[in-house]
Image (cartoon, helix red, strand yellow):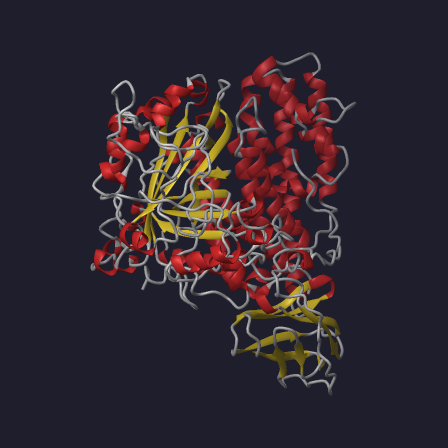
Amino acid sequence: MTDEGLSRRRLLGVSGTAAVAGVMAGAGGAYAVSRGEDAAAAGAPSSTTSGALALDAAIPFRGEHQAGIVTPAQDRLHFVALDVVTKDREQLRQLLEDWTRAAERMTAGAEAAPGGLVGGGPNRAPEDTGEAYGLPASGLTITIGYGPSLFDDRFGLAAKRPAALQDLPAFTGDQLDPRRTGGDLCIQACANDPQVAVHAVRNLVRLGFGVVAVRWSQLGFGRTSSTSTAQATPRNMFGFKDGTNNVKAEEPESLAQHVWVADADDTGGGAWMAGGSYLVARRIRMHIEVWDRTSLQEQEDVIGRDKKEGAPLGATKEFDTLDFAKKGPDGAPSIPMTAHVRLAHESQLGGIRILRRGYNFTDGSDGVGHLDAGLFFIAYMRDPAKQFVPMQRALAKADGLNEYIEHNGSAVFACPPGLKDGEHWGQALFA
Amino acid sequence: MPRPALRPALRVAPVAVSLAAALALAGCADKPATTAASTAAGAGAGGPITVNATDTACELSATTAKAGTVTFKVTNSGSKVNEFYLYAEGDRIVSEVENITPGLSRELKVELTEPGTFTTSCKPGMVGDGIRGTFTVTGTAAKGSTDAKVAKAIADYKAFVASEADEFVENTKGFVAAVKAGDVAKAKSLYAQARHPWEAIEPVAESFGDLDPKIDGREDVIADGMAFTGYHRLEKDLWKDGLQKDSGAIADQLLADVTEIAAKSKTVEPTALSIANGAKALLDEVATGKITGEEERYSHTDLWDFDGNLEGSRQALAALRPVIAERDPALQKALDADFTELSSLLAKHKAGADYKSYTALTAADLKELTVSLDALSEQVSKVPGVVEAK
């Protein structure tokens, strides 16, 4: 729920070719590598302003950066954290290669393996589980990340550990459940059809039996951030617009400054991370029932925006500048000192920004009749210690939202750069 | 509760799927097929057949070949990544070469020992049914050389089933005697091990009508109109309700049923495929009934059943070993490693000669066993495809 921002107006409702051009230019080469005539369709943002065709389209798997980071946020998520259970380095290396092949096929809308549906004949278990057969690619992206624990002494990777890949410190108020925390590897599958995202994770997990085991996973059902100016700002489970001032695909300079790891960031064992990004995931349970009984005034004061329009308090439009000095008729700041948007704003944090890519979640009920719902926070950044950590420290200390939320899962992963033709995941790591 | 496993192997041709058009990306596969026009003189075994794959066509230099090793040389002269497939009847993949990037040539060598009609397909863009053509293999059928190995595997497995069936009868006699003598402590001590041979050969034995539920049915899965009898009824008596007036009669009936099923089990004529499917079914039993603690809800002796299922699966695959090792040595190696791993994890829960109660297992224990079982089961699920008749 951080809401850092630029004081810059953004036009909503950009559509059609203008949006395509914007994304392709603005993403700084994110879509430079694409296959044949899929390119045009793949570049189209899957936003509420685009037609159904774009939502169905395939997004190129290969490129300078991994897909699924600045890719216009799809509507659905299946995120999985895994532990490596083999002791054999070669098995892990081979799995990453096998995953690459299957992931590339699935993002193109194909079965996980050639002839995966029925091609093995009647006596074999089909190589593809089948539930996505006949469905379009649906904007599927599959993004991989490596957790700090992967770089222990099991696989000889200690020397390759990037300096910036560190476990997050404990924050005030954390209620972390070990069963929702950490992991050696992660896979983020996003798509505009939940069945396509679930199919992707299911098939990759299946390929990994004996090598990796699922530690925890999370489904998300509605993007809570827009990562492109072509997308409208969505609402979170509190009913507020969230992430209005997110770093967006069309801001190559901001991406370079805040999201992508630069060549000079790690010249040691972690040099392979250049062009990659660090992913921080937090499962933020919301005390929905308590929030729903809270007055509108209190809700708006806690967030710092008005509920209907999403405008900063004291202003009138969503993309109006946040004026932290402005006072209301009672002489108090229009945006309260404990408001979420104030504490999370870059101006209060020495210019820190992150790219947020979170999803709403509801995992049914909690056993006493309350929704187990909230925000599965995902953010990409260049260095968690310099970005997420100070931001979360500031929020954990004073954010008025803390009364209504609880962080109960947490993880950090190093997401390597994108793959060139012929490359596969793990190649740089195991070189 | 067991599931059907060693059914006669039915060969059902998969339904040909033609939904591809619905999923094709704009401009990808499924263009009107410009299939191989050339039916030039059939290539002799060995002579490479060239395949010119473009975005809209799939041209073969020959569409017939003599039985033997046939080589296809596939050249992608289009702009999309391409694939080339050879299918047998029912779209069963005989062989394929994928990820042929534009400009690249790849060779595909295929052993076509049987004459018949096949289908070739190029798939520009890697999706859809592709651009298809018919391919004919001529010649006479060669008899498989592994018949002797398969026959020996079947004989070995039959011997294992017979030996377990005899043991099951003997064990049940002892257990039934203890129940009828009203010796609850002794009956309890014999219960889990008496069932062990049953758990090892369940897929064979359960194919005989009502005998399986009469012997091994759980109270919640007994069909309407059937009485709750057999091992699990006595389990409930021994651990929960105490021996009942009819416990002795139930015990007598159990011994009669076990004796009958043991005799019938010895008459089963398995095939390599049914043995392989049985090995998988036993691990499925562990996953759905044992690792969940459902099977032995009163005695909590589930780990004994786990051991029985695992042993039965291992023995079935041991019988097939010469066939698997010949056709897929890497799979045999993986099977050996994964069986060893799971057995050693299970052995951690032994308490002397006995197994711990299921209730003594922690969540971490169950996860460790599940992870290892998943790894093994995934490998075992590949065995039917390896041993199927070619």
A134 displayed left or right of B227: left
On screen, residue A129 above or below B62:
above
Residue under the point 67% across and 24% down: B220
Q: Which quarter of the rendered picture does the C terminus of chain B lie within?
A: bottom right
A314 displayed left or right of B12: left
Q: Kindly give the residue lying farthest to the front in the view shown.
A: A329
- Percent of width and height locating residue B53: 61, 76
- Percent of width and height locating residue A275: 32, 58
Depth check: A395 or B3 in front? A395
Q: Quadrant of residue B288?
A: top right
Residue under the point 35% across and 58% down: A417
Q: Which quarter of the rendered picture does the N terminus of chain B lie within?
A: top right
Is residue A93 visible in the rendered image? The answer is no
A2 displayed left or right of B284: left
- Percent of width and height locating residue B228: 71, 22
- Percent of width and height locating residue B62: 70, 83
Q: Kindly give the residue lying farthest to the bottom in the view shown.
A: B41
On screen, residue B334 above or below A233:
below
Is residue B76 visible in the rendered image? The answer is yes
Q: What is the total number of numbered labels drawn onto the structure image?
A: 0
Q: Quadrant of residue A93?
A: bottom left
Q: Quadrant of residue A37?
A: bottom right
